[in-house]
Amino acid sequence: MSDSVIVIDDEAGIRSAVEQWLSLSGFNVQLFSRAEDCLAELPAHFAGVILSDVRMPGMGGLGLLEQVQARDPELPVILLTGHGDVPMAVQAMRDGAYDFLEKPFSPESLLSSLHRALEKRRLVLENRRLHAQADARERLQATVLGVSAAVAQLRAQVLELAQLPVNVVIRGETGSGKELVARCLHDLGPRADKPFVALNCAAIPEQLFEAELFGHESGAFTGAQGKRIGKLEYADGGTLFLDEIESLPLAQQAKLLRVLQEQKLERLGSNHSIQVDLRLIAATKPDLLEEARSGRFREDLAYRLTVAELRLPPLRDRREDIPMLFEHFARTTAQRLGRSAPIISGAQLGQLLSHDWPGNVRELANAAERHALGLASPSREPVVQGLSLAAQQEAFEAQCLRAALARHQGDIKAVLEELQLPRRTLNEKMQRHGLQRELFRG
């Protein structure tokens, strides 16, 4: 892809000459005669350089520089100056301009300045991208909890898919966290500042589906008082999350498919098409393609939706995550109530690990809340089944570390003394079990 340069000059001859020089050198050039027009079309993360004359009717180059600095202080602006403007241009560089060229300037000096500015811009944007990735990874680890390989793989898939403009199907059992993952896909992607609209397809009566999805005009049907914006339109620019999409009536599936294909919709009672730009994330328990083969779901919509698919493992298949999740939910409940979370015993841990958790993370969260409230009364006889000895030892070790960290409120020195461990060994074990001392302070 060619390097991009925006050229702003009120003189058509200069614009034409600069465009010719730069195009022959392989640059992608965009021309403006007014600074105001450039600012109106300037992308939020422009990956190139702005080249602007200083003196122009309306907003001049210095005014443009001030506006650009307010938006992105690290976006390079090179100013083109007349002989008498040099002292002013030097001051502009102190105020943030990247460089200035005195007219008449040679193509060589222009190209040299542009190449240096573009290299700086590339480094700035790459640094921002890496910081954004690290921030997204940290946020995701604090949201989608777990130390199992399955959860690590899920987090990696979410990070990748969050940036891609594709529809996603999330498959998983009830309570496995499908809406949480959908929210992460939205929050970590480019639509994060736009609406995230969730709708459970199984909770809407069939006769109300169309109005709920598409909205309606006043008087479109009996009881339609006033205009109503539907979920599809409300999600414009953002993400629409359709939970239990296998429950969507076939008639509405056809209309949804048309919206996805044409990016347009019509409210009930209206002949006016409304343009919509949205990302669709659907959640389902069964395989949509299997549902299509059985005649319960439209095959064309199934293929349209399953551009990418995420599968959430049930909790019974990632038992090593149970202690961390239980402790997190119990601590969160206790903090909300202003009390200390009860320490979980070895017997209680064994009972947690032996349970199959048909309600998955939702059921575990409920059990943890009851534990924090002192309502749980687990058996004293743990029976751990379906877990290897090594996995049981890992889970018990993690719980011992959690208990010690909780007792000492994250004081690492006190934990080292109690457990009689070298500092390096404790650090390695805490990292392996996903434990952070900050979570236990206070």
Image (spheres, rainbow, N blue to C red):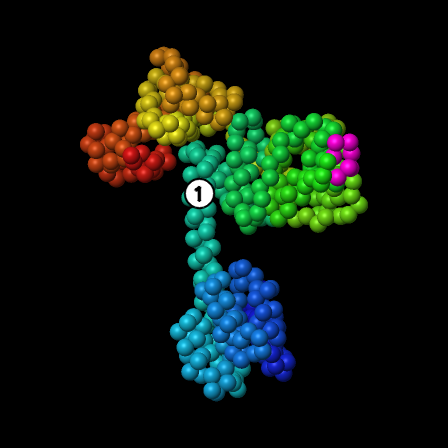
Q: As displayed, is residue 240 above or below residue 375?
A: below
Residue under the point 26% across and 39% down: 424
Helix, strand or loop at label 1? It is helix
Q: Is 433 within the magenta? A: no
Residue 289 position within the rendered picture, expressed as x and y whole percent measured from the top left: 68, 33
Residue under the point 45% across and 72% down: 97
Please identify the dominant SS of the magenta region: loop
Quarter of the N terminus within the rendering: bottom right
Res 412 seen here: yes
Residue 42 position within the rendered picture, expressed as x and y whole percent measured from the top left: 57, 64
Q: Is 219 within the magenta? A: yes
Q: As displayed, is residue 365 above or below residue 224?
A: above
Horizontal arrangement in the rendering, residue 54 relative to residue 436 (left or right): right
Q: Which residue is mark 1?
A: 139
Q: Which residues are magenta?
A: 218-224
Residue 328 position within the rendered picture, expressed as x and y whole percent measured from the top left: 39, 30
Q: As displayed, is residue 53 above or below residue 298?
A: below
Quarter of the C terminus within the rendering: top left
